[in-house]
Image: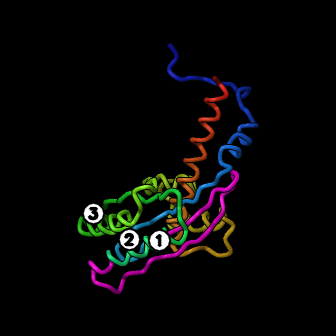
Amino acid sequence: MRKFRTTSWRAYRPDAAQVLRASAGAGCRILGLDPGSRRTGYGILAWEGGECAHVAHGCIDVSGLEFAARLRQIFEAVQALIATHTPDEVAIERVFVSRNADSALKLGQARGAALAAVPASTATFEYAPREVKRAVVGYGAAEKAQVGHMIARLLALDARPPVDAADALAIALCHLQTRRLAWLARAAAGERR
């Protein structure tokens, strides 16, 4: 019994991209969030007709406030973003726990405040930091400068976005790539039937 399924290059179907464009015709808007207790980055991408387009990016800076006020401000700012841009899906970074438990708890609370602002009807997805870096840069331990550079290149931005906004755009782009691969897999499965 074979361990791995083998396929030939002859199974390659270049028309799969047409199937992808047809299934993605309705479009989708993704809000990427990079939560932080002092700065929360956001990035919004649109998927239209098989193409990715940059909509907006920025940072929610709450560094001068008390912690409870920071959480309230993050909640309200994410609510305002959702009301303004009406994303179909939200992608957020999974909490990264290092050595400092206090920082991890604060980060988790900031992430919770951002997620609480997302309506129940909006699908939410989470991605690990290494997964996001691997999707954008090709290396899971890439530096923040590398992520910012690749985001500026991939999205054809005039300048490199701020670090937190670049991370949020990377999360949104990672989610769009995951969606695209799922569409391609469904199209390939439909072809085989």
Name the main secondary structure of what is drawn in magenta.
strand
Q: Amino acid at mark 3?
A: Arg
The reply to whether the C-beta atoms of the residues labelled 2 and 3 are less than 8 Å apart is: no
Viewer-side residue, 176 vs 21: 21
Which residue does the numbered mark 1 point to in the structure image?
41
Q: Amino acid at mark 1?
A: Gly
Question: Mark 1 and mark 3: span between their CA atoms?
Answer: 23 Å
Which residue does the numbered mark 3 point to in the structure image?
99
Horizontally, is 5 left or right of 131 in the view? right
Question: Mark 1 and mark 2: span between their CA atoms?
Answer: 8 Å
If you read the primary sequence from the N terminus, does the residue marked by circle 2 or circle 3 appear first? Answer: 2
The answer to whether residue 31 of the structure is visible from this angle is yes
Which residue does the numbered mark 2 point to in the structure image?
36
Tell me which segment is drawn in magenta. 42-70
- Magenta span has 46? yes
Q: Residue at x 53, y 72 (%)?
A: 84
The reply to whether the C-beta atoms of the residues labelled 1 and 2 are less than 8 Å apart is: yes
